Image: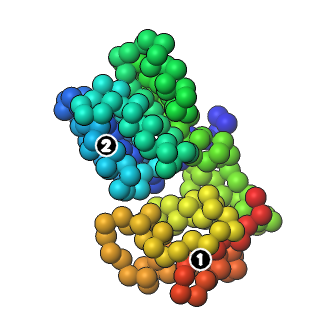
Amino acid sequence: MNTYNLLDILSDKNVLCVEDEAIILCNIMESLELFFGKVVGVKDGREALEEALGNIYDVLMLDVSIPHMDGLEVVKKIRQVNKKIPIIILSAHTEQEYLWRAVELKITRYLTKPYDKNTLIKALEDVALELVDHQPVISIMPECVYDYCRKTITLHQNTLHLSKSESRLLEYFLKRPNQTITYEQLFEYMWEFEQPSKEALKSIVKELRKKIHSDFIKNLYGVGYVCEIQL
């Protein structure tokens, strides 16, 4: 595992950060921007819940003591619709009640304030591993592997680097092998509020097919795609 920089897994991922103190939120966001592709910050529980449920995020980071709805209550509601998203909780609380609530909600890490840089790095490494099911490198077909850290495809001993869009799309497919994935799902995940043409999506798929295999991603006429893979 030491040969990998696990934090590179986060380079094309989106994170939502929730903290009610403006200066602390700004500092946390600046730290997260070193590792994530996109960082969004909000200041209260109600806004956090709306943002988390209304948009696509790969990771959540929440303070417990925030206005309108505490962080663990926000997580409880999010867990009703998303069981797997990695979540880091920040808190000045060390009471057993808060710790047990966090455990029950399947929190990736519970960081007690004040925390240092190394503690945050370790939490982010745990998040990164959780995002890839603890497999930084995965075989996607004979003699073809994908490296989540380096964002590369190695096919027949030839290594090719993927763009941010290509790696983000491929990782979405790898999380949903042999499942029908609609154009609408892909548009929402890849571009959120932007309205790209279907041709933009087809262009990324075309580049992935060139680097992996022409039959790796199948067209479903008028619907979307299916990624045929034996994991």
Whether 148 is drawn above or below 107: the answer is below
Judged left or right of residue 231, residue 52 is left
Nearer-N-terminus badge (1/2): 2
Identify the image quadrant of residue 1.
Answer: top right
Q: Which residue is mark 1?
A: 225
Name the amino acid, label 2: Ala
**In the depicted view, which residue is nearer to us: 41 or 158?**
41
> Could you tell me which secondary element the residue under label 1 belongs to?
strand
Q: Which residue is outermost to the top? A: 95
Disc 2 element: helix
**Residue beneath disc 2:** 48
Q: Is residue 65 left or right of residue 167?
A: left
Location of the C terminus by quadrant is bottom right
Q: Which color scheme did the rendering employ for the protein?
A: rainbow
> Is residue 224 or residue 27 the one in the foreground?
224
Can the viewer see residue 47? yes
Instruction: Report, in whole angstroms, how far the alpha carbon at label 1 lies from the one at label 2.
Output: 32 Å
Q: Residue at x 44, y 84 (%)?
A: 199
Amino acid under disc 1: Tyr
When the figure is inspected, residue 196 is found, relative to residue 3, above or below; the finding is: below
- What is the residue that sits farthest to the bottom in this orientation? 221
x 48%, y 69%: residue: 186
